[in-house]
Amino acid sequence: MYNNEQLERDLMNRKFVGTSRGSSKKQNIYANKSSLILNWILHEGIEKKYFSIRSVAKQVGVSLGLVQKTFELLVKEGVLSYSGMRTAKKFTLINPGILLENWIQYYNIVKKCKTWTYQTGLDEKDEIIKILQQSELSNDVVLALHSSAEELKLSNTNLRTVELYMLSPSKRKDIESLLYLEPKERGYEVLLIDPYYKDILKRLVSKEGQLLCSPLLLTYLDLYHFPLRGKEQADFILDHSKCLKSILNRK
């Protein structure tokens, strides 16, 4: 399997902090719960002429206050514009590219997520996937990073690593036992990740006989700052995704 000293250094020296450079206001709208609103804006809002705070809160399933706070900051950042007054305000997405670029600057998977690196007693990646699919843990993991890119048919590497988000980190020991995992300090064959954007992942719908897969947008965000050929893979996804290109080109 791939051996990468830079990955080891970044994962071993990462800082598990909830802050980054920039204002606290910007950090708030790129947090876990408010990411549901950002995700809606870039998938649903981009297709709408206008939308209201109340309608978005209902569709996303978050509080009116959180949507209002998020929208106010996005107006200041030049992402949204509005017309009307008070409760009659109607919002329009005018610059999704700025939203995605700011999100990239705020979120770094290495800094935001705790990870564990392993070697496995299993022979092939396909065997790992098959065992997971047939186990009771199949709905507790989500394919991430390069494994997600491969599942989305947007992979440009020959890496045979397996990267998994854990929806229930308390089951990490069960996953280790199932896949015959042993801690590995340098490089990895299997990477387990405690997700930062838990709420986005928990809304995924499983398909019979398949593992859950990280959505395209989150896969792109994850890979962008990932040290193991991540930027290369993120750029490839952007070049081959009409959805992402339309977001960045609408400035």
Image (cartoon, rainbow, N blue to C red):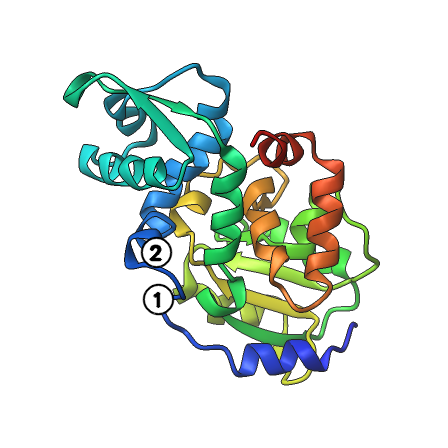
231 or 212: nearer the viewer: 231
The circle on residue 176 is none
Counting from the top left corner in percent of width and height, residue 84 is at: 23, 16
What is the quadrant of the N terminus in the image? bottom right
**Residue type, label 1:** Gly
Helix or strand or loop: what does disc 1 sit on? loop
**Residue type, label 2:** Gln
Q: Residue at x 66, y 34 (%)?
A: 245
Residue 11 image-quadrant placement = bottom right
Q: Is residue 246 left or right of residue 91?
A: right
Q: Is residue 11 above or below residue 143?
A: below
Q: Is residue 67 left or right of residue 14?
A: left
Residue 85 image-quadrant placement = top left
- Alpha-carbon span between mark 1 and mark 2: 9 Å
Label 2 Cα crowd, 10 Å radius (few <14 / some 14-19 / many 20+)? some
Q: Which residue is mark 1?
A: 18
Q: Is residue 211 left or right of residue 189?
A: left
114 or 71: nearer the viewer: 71
Counting from the top left corner in percent of width and height, residue 220 is at: 61, 48
Q: Residue at x 48, y 69 (%)?
A: 111
Q: Which residue is mark 2?
A: 27
